[in-house]
Amino acid sequence: MALDIGGKTIATDEEGYLENLNDWTPEVATAMALAEETPVALNDEHWEIINFLREYYEEYQIAPAVRVLTKAVGKRLGADKGNSKYLYSLFPYGPGKQACKYAGLPKPTGCV
Amino acid sequence: MAMLHIVNKSPFERNALKSCLAHALAGDAVLLIEDAVIGAVSGTSLASELQAAMSEQAVSIYALGPDLSARGVSEQRMLDGIQVVDYAGFVDLTVANEKTQSWL
Amino acid sequence: MAKKFIYLNRKAPYGTVYALESLEVVLIAAAFEQEVTLAFLDDGVYQIAKGQNPKALGMKNFSATYNALGDYGITQFYVERESLAERGLSEDDLMPIVYEDEDDDYAEKPSVRVVSRAEMAQIMADQDVTFSF
C-alpha cells in the first residue's frame, strides 16, 4: 500500500503503518486519517495524543502498550484524558493501533 | 528443585559451559549436546573443571551419545564420570528434573 | 497464581539478534502480568551499558527501551558482579534504570541490582519459568 502526499509516494504496510518511520510529517498523519473508511479530521485533541506518542517513541524507541499509554497520558495530560474512554472516543479503532499509525510509529509490540 | 542445564556449544568456542558450571547448584544435571560434547573428552584443558563440578559441586554431567558418535568420540575417550545418554535418556532427564535451562 | 519468569541475557547487543529478541519477548509477556525478572550475565551485561549508539550501524538504539520497562511493571534487573568485573566494567558503566513505585507515592527507585555469581545462581533456581537468550 502507499499514500500519495503532494505528489510524493509514501510506502505503508498492509495495515497502513509507515514502512519507513522517517517518512512521517504532519501531512502524513492528516492524510492517513482522511483515508479511513469513515474519514477523520484530526483536531487538537488528536494531535495532543499523536505528539505525545512521538515524544514517547523518541525517548524509549517503542510504541507503548495501551495500558502503558493510558497511564502515561494520565500523568502528563491529566486524569480526564488518561482513561480508555477518552482515548477510544478519539481513536475508535484503538488508541494503540490507530494513534500509533497516525504518529508514524510501528505497531505496538504485543498488540494483538 | 533440581535443574537440568543444557549446553550445545563447544566450550573451546564459547563460555556457555563454563558459565553453566559456575551457576549450577548441588543436585543439578548438565547435559552436553551438539558441539558441546567435545568438552566431554578426557585430557582437555577443561577436564579438571568438569571433574571438580562432579565431585565438589555434586553436579551430574551427561553427554548425548548420538552427538558423540557423530563426532567420532568413543566412550573410552571420555572423561571419567560423564554419563552417556541416548535420546530416551535425554527425555528421562527432562522428566527427572523439575526445570530446564538452556545455555545458548 | 502469578508465576515467576526469568529472562537470561548472556549476549552483547547488536552482534546477534538475541538481545533485541529477548526484549521483544519481555514486552509481549508483560501483558500477562506475571512476576518478571531480567538477568544480565556474561556478555549480556553490555545490553544495559551506558552510552550505546548504534546509529552508524543503521540499527535502532533499543537500549532506550529498558528505561520504559518500569511502566510495564518490570522492575527487577539483576546484573552479575563477576561478569562486569571480567569485562573491566563496574556498576557505574550501567544505565541508571529506575521505576516509579506506585505504593510509595511514585518515588523513583533503582531497578538494577548488582549481585554475586552465587546470588545469581540462587535467583535462577528460584524461578518457575526460564527463557534463555
Image (cartoon, grey):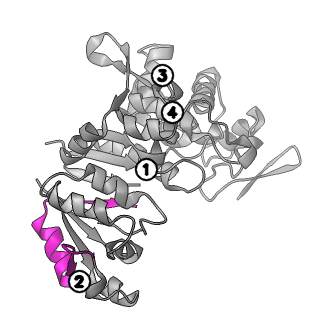
Residue B6 visible somewhere in the drawing: yes
Residue B24: x percent and y percent?
23, 53
Mark 1 burial class by Cα count in 10 Å: few <14, some 14-19, many 20+: many
Mark 2 burial class by Cα count in 10 Å: few <14, some 14-19, many 20+: few
Residue A32: x percent and y percent?
68, 43
How far is the residue under mark 2 from the one under mark 3? 54 Å
| Amino acid type, callout 1 | Arg
Q: Nearer the viewer, residue B49 or B27?
A: B49
**Contact? badges 4 and 2 (CB < 8 Å):** no
Residue on which disc 3 sits: A73
How far is the residue under mark 1 from the one under mark 2? 27 Å
| Quadrant in which the C terminus of chain B is drawn | bottom left
Q: Could you say which disc has been placed on residue C10 in the image?
A: 1
Q: Are marks 4 and 2 on the same chain?
A: no
Answer with left or right where residue A47 lies relative to residue C10. right
| Amino acid type, callout 2 | Tyr
The answer to whether residue B103 is magenta is yes
Residue on which disc 4 sits: C89
Q: Which residues are magenta?
A: B79-104
